[in-house]
Image (cartoon, rainbow, N blue to C red):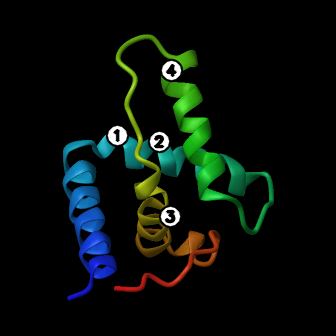
């Protein structure tokens, strides 16, 4: 097993743990993606949605902000496209090389 494979596996495991412990993060990702989709766009940047989530969490809301790892962006994009058929193909993703 190569070093790259181990890194991909570790990131995936960390994402799954984080996602399980923080379901509100996926809900925020879905909410902001839906807002974009509702404007008529057929595709968008998951990274832009992550930055919007950071802004919302740190600037627009009162309370504890949440930290988002850039390593999880593609995982949230894939999760949304898998869980919600209306988002199939909405984000461009690279093949995970494990």
Tell me which residue sits at (28%, 78%) in the image.
3
Question: Marks 1 and 4, how far apart in space?
Answer: 15 Å
- Give the distance between the C-alpha atoms of the residues marked 3 and 1, in whole angstroms: 15 Å
* Disc assigned to residue 77: 3
Q: Residue at point 23% right, 57% down?
A: 14
CB atoms at circles 2 and 3 under 8 Å apart? Answer: no
Q: Between marks 2 and 3, how big is the CA–CA gap? A: 12 Å
CB under 8 Å between discs 1 and 4: no
Which of the two discs, 3 and 1, labels the residue nearer the N terminus? 1
| Pointer 2 or 4: first along the chain | 2
- Residue drawn at x 34%, y 40% is 24
Q: Give the label on residue 24, or none.
A: 1
Tag 1: Cα neighbours inside 10 Å, few (<14), some, or many (≥20)? few
Contact between marks 1 and 2 (CB within 8 A): the answer is yes
Q: Looking at this rendering, what residue extends furthest in the top direction?
A: 62
Rendered residue at 72%/67% (across/down):
43
Mark 4 — residue?
58
Q: Residues within 10 Å of mark 2 (few under 14, many from 20)?
A: some
Q: Which mark is residue 15?
A: none
**Sequence-earlier tag: 4 or 3:** 4
Counting other residues with Cα less than 10 Å from the Cα at mark 3, is it few (<14), some (14-19), or many (20 or more)?
Answer: many
Q: Label 1, label 2: how many angstroms apart (C-alpha)?
A: 6 Å
Question: Do labels 3 and 1 touch, CB within 8 Å?
Answer: no
Mark 1 or mark 4: name the one nearer the start of the chain. 1
Image quarter hosting the C terminus: bottom left
Could you say where residue 62 lies in the image, as x and y percent from the top left? 44, 11
């Amino acid at each position: 097993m190569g070093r790259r494979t181990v890194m991909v596996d570790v990131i995936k495991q960390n994402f799954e743990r984080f996602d399980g412990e923080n379901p509100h993060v996926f809900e925020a990702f879905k909410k902001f993606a839906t807002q974009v989709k509702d404007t008529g766009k057929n595709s968008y940047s998951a990274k832009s949605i992550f930055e919007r989530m950071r802004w919302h969490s740190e600037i627009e809301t009162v309370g504890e902000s949440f930290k988002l790892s850039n390593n999880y962006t593609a995982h949230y994009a894939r999760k949304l496209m898998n869980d919600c058929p209306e988002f199939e193909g909405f984000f461009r993703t690279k093949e995970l090389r494990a």
